Image: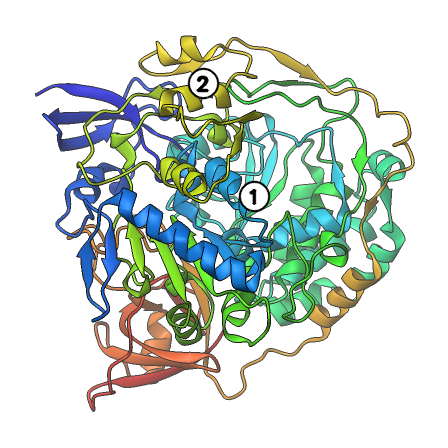
């Protein structure tokens, strides 16, 4: 059978794969051992891509809800016309803000989907834009807005002496980095080679993860105490004068205020709150500060815990006070290939708190971040009466019925919409509540390139892939749905600086070329390379600051951050009668909720509650028992698993799982937790 080369599009790693096909059927997917970046690595969910394509629950035509509440197939052109008509009626009566768009994680891995979805949304005039970014990593945006941003670039993993990973486990779910090349491809090999060249690795996690066992130092803190730990590290660095005084004098304000704010976070206090031994707090701080190069980076674990905004801020402060950024005149490789290269400058973009100006939601007067409202208020935007409440919602590549906080409230809100449109390959929990479900093409049924992923790559690399197999007759490319929806509504969309003509619709290949026309390697050269292009080395030099920017500074400790530090340091553990704490983890086989329904993919077929064996013994629970876990926010049933890697007093579970809870049976045990 023929084997075709491509790359996976389930996460930013974009691992090279060999796809064996028989006609339009995928027989197998394996890692491509000759791929320049991934070198043969692939994960279980990537290798099961054929099952995602061809599974019995995959939608091969769009669906429409009937008056009886069932679903019937509908031609996509009919669905688009009906959706456009209903949207016009809703926004015509209630205004454009009665419409919202929710962008899920999976739309990010198709180069054309996100830009075209946003292009369509701009034509509507609505300001109700939501995404998964504000569910699990909004704190990163808030830090940048409150602190400002240094524009000279970050130090890189491949030249680092020390690295701190907090709340992320790249051995199971790739870190992605923050534009610093931190463990995106082939994690086991990447970490091993870094350790061999002398890198010191510090891992912060409540569990002794697959990454933590490879670290020089594992700080196994209590869940939710990240902010206190990072304050403790900063206290050691600043009190021992281990910070980079030259960088701080030039680019920082509020250093003395930060020093005073973290002063209560002595090693002893940090140990009392986090459970990390005081000696390890001191050792970690010194190890990080003594490294000549290297950064602290975080994953969703930090962002999904309490005090996440200030915890992320303090991690950023670790990088700033240690001066872990490129200086004027320093040289760094240009990793952009298809993407446009933006000059590096030794200057600061000052704080820009977008939520304090411009559009604000009627829900709490909350403003936008990067043009988005926080997804945590989406249910209220739907349920709370008001002239501009959300009555119509389009969901692209996401599953908010499982991703939004307070599942029951989220499902109630989605059920009360006048129009819910879901672009999904399956009848997800959200799709089952929809009026229309648009069936899109899947990974190997569309052409694509890696422009949006170059930010995460450790080397300057780009790859194009053609369509490998023909899609079912009833599906449509995601971007084309939004393009045709705009056209059906009488609007033209602007893409890559062009206004597209609805009477002469472009092809996917033409759009991909438009998108990449400002890159340094011609798209034709990338398209002709079967395994992509490792671009010739090209250096970027950090330039001098632009005129008028010399006074801009990174704000380390503005008043609200100061208050949040004090609150985190003074807060007592919030047990409120609960015996355990809940922390999140990822499964190697799943991408959030994607893959749960693929037979045999998830190791257990369910979401185990991982608990330390000592805790299970104390609770009188055996491995495999069904337990009910109760918190202030709700309750779930789960299967208890003994797990010595989990910190005592902790329950560790994967997110984006679950179904309505049946009535409790007498055989169940009960464990209580606090989140």
Q: Is residue 347 visible?
A: yes
Mark 2 lies on residue: 513
Which quadrant would residue 51 be assigned to in this image?
Answer: top left
Left-right relation of 421 to 251: left
The residue labelled by disc 1 is 122
- Could you say whether the residue bearing mark 2 is in a helix, strand or loop? helix
How many numbered discs? 2
Q: Nearer the viewer, mark 1 or mark 2?
A: 1
Which quadrant of the figure has residue 154? Answer: top right
Q: Nearer the viewer, residue 413 or 13?
A: 413
Question: Residue 445 appears at what percent x and percent y?
Answer: 25, 31
Residue 616, above or below 429: below
SS class, disc 1: helix
Residue 1 vertical placement versus 362 (above, below): above
Please state the horizontal and vertical placement of residue 252, each as a whole percent of the image: 85, 42
Please provide percent x and percent y for residue 582: 45, 71
Mark 2 neighbour class, 10 Å CA radius: few under 14, some 14 to 19, many 20 or more: some
């Amino acid at each position: 059978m023929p084997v075709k080369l491509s790359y996976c599009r389930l996460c930013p790693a974009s691992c090279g794969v060999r796809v064996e096909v028989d006609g339009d059927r995928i027989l197998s997917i394996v890692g491509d051992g000759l791929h320049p970046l991934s070198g043969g690595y692939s994960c279980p969910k990537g290798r099961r891509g054929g099952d995602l394509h061809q599974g019995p629950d995959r939608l091969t035509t769009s669906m429409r809800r009937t008056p009886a509440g069932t679903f019937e197939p509908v031609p996509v052109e009919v669905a688009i016309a009906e959706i456009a008509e209903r949207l016009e009626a809703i926004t015509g009566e209630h205004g454009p803000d009665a419409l919202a768009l929710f962008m899920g994680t999976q739309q990010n891995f198709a180069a054309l989907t996100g830009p075209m979805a946003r292009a369509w949304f701009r034509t509507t005039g609505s300001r109700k834009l939501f995404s998964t970014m504000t569910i699990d990593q909004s704190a990163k945006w808030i830090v940048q807005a409150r602190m400002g941003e240094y524009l000279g670039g970050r130090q890189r993993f491949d030249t680092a002496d020390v690295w701190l990973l907090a709340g992320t486990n790249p051995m199971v779910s790739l870190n992605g980095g923050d534009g610093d090349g931190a463990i995106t491809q082939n994690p086991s090999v990447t970490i091993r080679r870094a350790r061999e060249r002398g890198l010191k690795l510090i891992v912060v996690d409540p569990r002794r993860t697959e990454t933590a066992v490879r670290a020089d130092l594992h700080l196994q803190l209590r869940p939710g105490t990240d902010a206190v730990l990072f304050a403790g590290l900063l206290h050691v660095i600043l009190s021992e004068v281990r910070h980079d005084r030259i960088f701080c004098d030039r680019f920082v304000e509020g250093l003395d205020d930060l020093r005073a704010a973290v002063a209560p976070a002595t090693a002893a206090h940090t140990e009392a709150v986090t459970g990390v031994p005081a000696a390890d707090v001191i050792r970690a701080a010194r190890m990080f500060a003594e490294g000549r190069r290297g950064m602290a980076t975080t994953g969703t674990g930090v962002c999904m815990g309490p005090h996440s905004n200030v915890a992320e801020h303090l991690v950023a402060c670790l990088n700033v006070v240690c001066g872990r950024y490129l200086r004027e005149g320093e040289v760094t490789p240009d990793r952009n290939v298809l993407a446009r290269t933006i000059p590096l400058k030794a200057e600061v973009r000052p704080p820009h708190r977008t939520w304090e100006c411009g559009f604000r939601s009627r829900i709490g007067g909350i403003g936008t971040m990067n043009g988005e409202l926080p997804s945590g208020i989406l249910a209220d935007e739907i349920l709370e009466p008001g002239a501009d409440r959300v009555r119509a919602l389009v969901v692209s590549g996401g599953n908010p019925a499982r991703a939004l906080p307070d599942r029951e409230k989220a499902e109630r809100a989605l059920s009360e919409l006048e129009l819910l449109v879901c672009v999904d390959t399956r009848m997800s929990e959200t799709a089952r509540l929809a009026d229309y479900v648009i069936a899109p093409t899947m990974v190997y049924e569309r052409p694509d390139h890696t422009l949006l992923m170059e930010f995460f790559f450790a080397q300057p690399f780009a790859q194009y892939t053609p369509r490998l197999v023909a899609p079912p007759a009833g599906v449509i490319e995601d971007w084309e749905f939004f393009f045709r929806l705009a056209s059906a509504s009488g609007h033209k969309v602007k893409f890559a600086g062009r206004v597209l003509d609805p009477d002469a619709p472009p092809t996917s290949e033409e759009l991909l070329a438009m998108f990449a026309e400002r890159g340094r390697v011609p798209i034709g050269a990338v398209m002709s390379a079967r395994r992509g292009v490792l671009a010739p080395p090209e250096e970027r030099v950090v330039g001098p600051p632009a005129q008028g920017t010399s006074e801009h500074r990174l704000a380390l400790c503005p008043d609200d951050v100061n208050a949040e530090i004090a609150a985190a340091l003074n807060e007592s553990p919030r047990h409120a009668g609960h015996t355990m704490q809940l922390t999140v983890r990822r499964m190697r086989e799943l991408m959030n909720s994607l893959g749960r329904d693929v037979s045999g993919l998830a190791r257990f077929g369910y979401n185990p509650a991982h608990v330390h064996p000592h805790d299970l013994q104390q609770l009188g629970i055996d491995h495999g028992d069904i337990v009910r876990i109760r918190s202030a926010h709700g309750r779930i049933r789960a299967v208890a698993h003994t797990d010595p890697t989990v910190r005592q007093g902790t329950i560790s579970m994967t997110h984006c799982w679950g179904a309505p809870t049946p009535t409790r049976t007498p055989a169940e045990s009960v464990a209580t937790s606090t989140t």
